[in-house]
């Protein structure tokens, strides 16, 4: 009787514990991806640059840190928003294939997925608007908005 009671309590505690929501939109090969974005001035990364990982965590200056971790900022709570962003970025990369427009000041978005042995980097001049960089400029703004929206909810 005591054994059953203890097992019941243990089961309730385990099932009620807070765990991070799974991200169903990611396949097994997508579980370790990173999205880096930021600003490059005269070939060097300047100011804040960010990394979004497959566990929905955003870090500041992870791109420049030696251990690749950077300073934790926030976690994206809305999995639908996260999955939408991921899907949209995949579609933009497939449509564009390559974007490299070096200038004195550039914005960049980099997608790294070791599970698929895939790396993509878009680099563009934010002072000019053209067909090639429009989608990436919109995606850059969405990534930036994730930081402010999720910081206010955390």
Image (tube, rainbow, N blue to C red):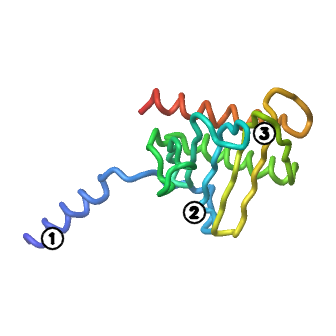
Q: How far from the left and from the top, in percent, is residue 112?
A: 66, 58
Identify the residue shown where x is 11% and y is 73%.
3
Q: Which residue is mark 3?
A: 136
Q: Which residue is mark 1?
A: 4
Q: Nearer the viewer, residue 68 or 84?
A: 68
Q: Point out the image quarter for the C terminus.
A: top left
**Considering only vertical position in the picture, is 81 above or below 6?**
above
Of labels 1 and 3, earlier in sequence is 1
Near mark 1 (Cα within 10 A), the count class, few <14, some 14-19 or many ≥20, is few
Q: Which residue is mark 2?
A: 31
Of labels 1 and 2, earlier in sequence is 1
The quadrant where residue 8 appears? bottom left
Near mark 3 (Cα within 10 A), the count class, few <14, some 14-19 or many ≥20, is many
Disc 1 to disc 3, C-alpha distance: 57 Å
Identify the residue shown where x is 83% and y is 42%.
102
Identify the residue shown where x is 84% and y is 47%.
100
Q: Are marks 3 and 2 in contact (CB under 8 Å)?
A: no
Q: Is residue 120 left or right of residue 47?
A: right
Of labels 3 and 2, earlier in sequence is 2
């Amino acid at each position: 009787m005591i054994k059953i009671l203890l097992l019941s309590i243990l089961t309730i505690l385990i099932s009620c514990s807070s765990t991070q929501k799974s991200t169903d939109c990611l396949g097994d090969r997508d579980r370790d991806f990173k999205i880096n974005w930021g600003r490059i001035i005269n070939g060097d990364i300047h100011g804040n640059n960010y990394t979004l990982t497959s566990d929905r965590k955003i870090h500041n200056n992870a791109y420049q840190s030696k251990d690749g971790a950077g300073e934790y900022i926030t976690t994206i709570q809305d999995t639908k928003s996260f999955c939408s962003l991921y899907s949209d970025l995949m579609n933009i990369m497939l449509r564009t294939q390559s974007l490299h427009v070096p200038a004195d000041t550039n914005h960049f978005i980099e997608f790294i997925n070791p599970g698929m042995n895939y790396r993509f980097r878009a680099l563009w001049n934010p002072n000019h608007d053209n067909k090639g960089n429009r989608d990436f400029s919109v995606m850059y703004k969405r990534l930036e908005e994730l930081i402010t929206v999720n910081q206010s909810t955390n």
